[in-house]
Image (cartoon, helix red, strand yellow):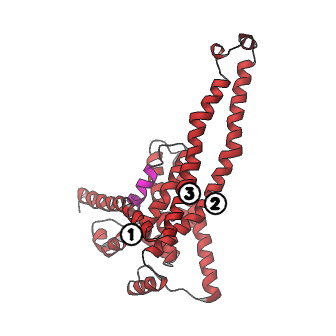
Amino acid sequence: MDVSAKLKVAGILWLKGVGEACCLHRVLILCIRSKRLLIRTGQCFLLNGFIFLGSIFVLNSVVIPALWWMLPDQCSQIVSHKLCDLGGTLKFYSFLRLALIQLFYVLWFYPLYVFSIVLSTIWYNDIAKYGYAAMGRSKLTVEKDSSQNNSSHVKGPSGLGGVMIGISQQVYSILLLSVFFLEVYATGFIPYIGKLLNFLLLSWMYAYYCFEYKWNFNEVALNRRLEYFESHWLFFAGFGSPCVLAIFFFSPLVSYGIMAILFPLFVLTATGSESEQEISFEKHKWRATGVERLPIFYVANKVS
């Protein structure tokens, strides 16, 4: 198959992922079905949108301009010119202004940031759980469906052995994604193509996070998740792109606030998605065009 045909197939898979991520009407449907889901989602918006991003807006629009007005950096703005005649006045004002801003960060923003991360992590799991329940799925029906299609679910041992395997998989998954995050961070320093690679890796990372909740509820083994993700890397690159595009051009704190609002929405779209099953059934078709598995987690897997 020629290059143009391969690019066309790649574009279709990528756009399928983008389209799936943008199916935000599922969020509204699921929230209508589940009051608990609506409350949890609303709490995420309140904490990360109104309080966290609102605090950044107040800092930049009110606090910092007020400090510049009270502690100016030019003699013409100082009421008493006697103070301006003193050589160290402007330097003192500059130091005091910077110190007060940093104090605002230390006493408010950083504690709020940590509090938001911890609480949001708990809420994201609740949102995925309530969304999964609102889909009308249960563990029994999932196991029944999976038994008919053994592409992703493998029945593991029960009892203490099953618990230990589950814990070990979670620990390994955390290590794997931590190493992958370091890869994402490192690519940002590569000249010329660093930003593009950073965008692509971030897209994969957020897509994996979004679908991981669903795979946890379906009890999909970690090796099956990685195999499936790497086999459909174009779809997941597309799914994660809207997540990253919304935060890519902002400062780190603003990016976190925006992502903390949008992430539960994409988790719910992933929870309600059936498209990844569709591309699984068409796997042979994509491979016939030359779209093979891409070892995205190779380095992270070896290091972990």
Which residue in the structure is indicated by mark 3?
Answer: 181
Categorize mark 3 by other alpha carbons within 10 Å: few (<14), some (14-19), many (20+).
some
Most foreground residue, 100 or 245: 100
Q: Earlier in the sequence, mark 3 or mark 2?
A: 2
Tag 3: residue type?
Phe
Tag 1: residue type?
Ser
Q: Earlier in the sequence, mark 3 or mark 1?
A: 3
Between tags 3 and 2, which lies in front?
2
Which residue in the structure is indicated by mark 2?
Answer: 118
Q: Is residue 155 inside the magenta stretch?
A: no
**What secondary structure is found at the residue carrying circle 1?**
loop
Most foreground residue, 31 or 175: 31
Q: Estimate the x, y position of residue 201 in percent, counting from the top left.
A: 47, 55
Residue at the spot 70% in from the left edge and 19% down from the top edge: 90
Categorize mark 1 by other alpha carbons within 10 Å: few (<14), some (14-19), many (20+).
some
Quarter containing the C terminus: bottom right
Tag 2: residue type?
Val
Categorize mark 2 by other alpha carbons within 10 Å: few (<14), some (14-19), many (20+).
few
**What secondary structure is found at the residue carrying circle 2?**
helix
Q: Is residue 244 inside the magenta stretch?
A: yes
Does the residue at mark 1 contact the one at mark 2 (Cβ under 8 Å)? no
Instruction: Give the magenta part as a residue range.
Output: 236-248
Which residue in the structure is indicated by mark 1?
Answer: 273
Q: Estimate the x, y position of residue 68 in percent, counting from the top left.
A: 63, 26
In space, the residues marked 3 and 2 are separated at their CA atoms by: 18 Å
